[in-house]
Amino acid sequence: MTNPFTILKAWGIALNPDEDQNRVASARLEKCSVCPHKKVNALAVHYCSLCGCPIKGKIFTPDRVKLDEESGRVLNPCDDNRWEE
Ligand code: SF4
């Protein structure tokens, strides 16, 4: 997640998520919790070492996992393709 607008949107959603956004974030958090790329910094903030984002905000990324029709590639907001939606 490198787009600053996407980061802002994610943090905005994190402040007041709806039921579906909470459901998706919980499922993503389960994946992040057991991921080897999850690290903790000196301030005890859990973050993704691939993108540098705090996991608390990243899991609310509005982009969903989807198939890019043109390239045939699966686009996943998780840089290690671990998220399912
Ligand atoms: S690589 Fe994906 S699953 Fe792992 S910590 Fe980063 S966002 Fe979470």
Image: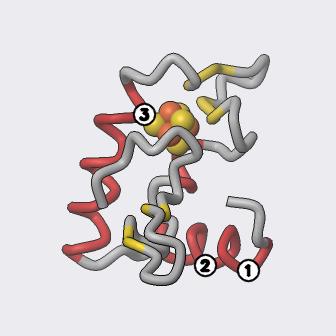
Q: In this view, does 34 lie above or below 65?
A: above
Q: Mark 3 — residue?
A: 32
Residue at mark 1: C-beta within 8 A of ligand 1? no
Task: Give the CA distance from mark 3 to mark 2.
Answer: 20 Å
- Kindly state the secondary structure of the residue where label 1 is placed: helix
Q: Mark 2 — residue?
A: 9
User: Residue 82: where, in percent of width, then height?
Assistant: 39, 40
> Disc 3 marks which amino acid?
Cys
Residue at mark 3: C-beta within 8 A of ligand 1? yes
Q: Which mark is residue 69?
A: none
Dot placed on the residue nearer the N-terminal end, 3 or 1 = 1
Task: Give the CA distance from mark 3 to mark 1.
Answer: 22 Å
Q: Residue at (76%, 62%) from the top-left corner? A: 2
Determine whether, in the image, residue 38 is placed left or right of residue 69.
Answer: right
Determine whether, in the image, residue 22 is placed left or right of residue 60.
Answer: left
> Disc 1 marks which amino acid?
Phe
The answer, for residue 15, to whether it is visible in the render is no
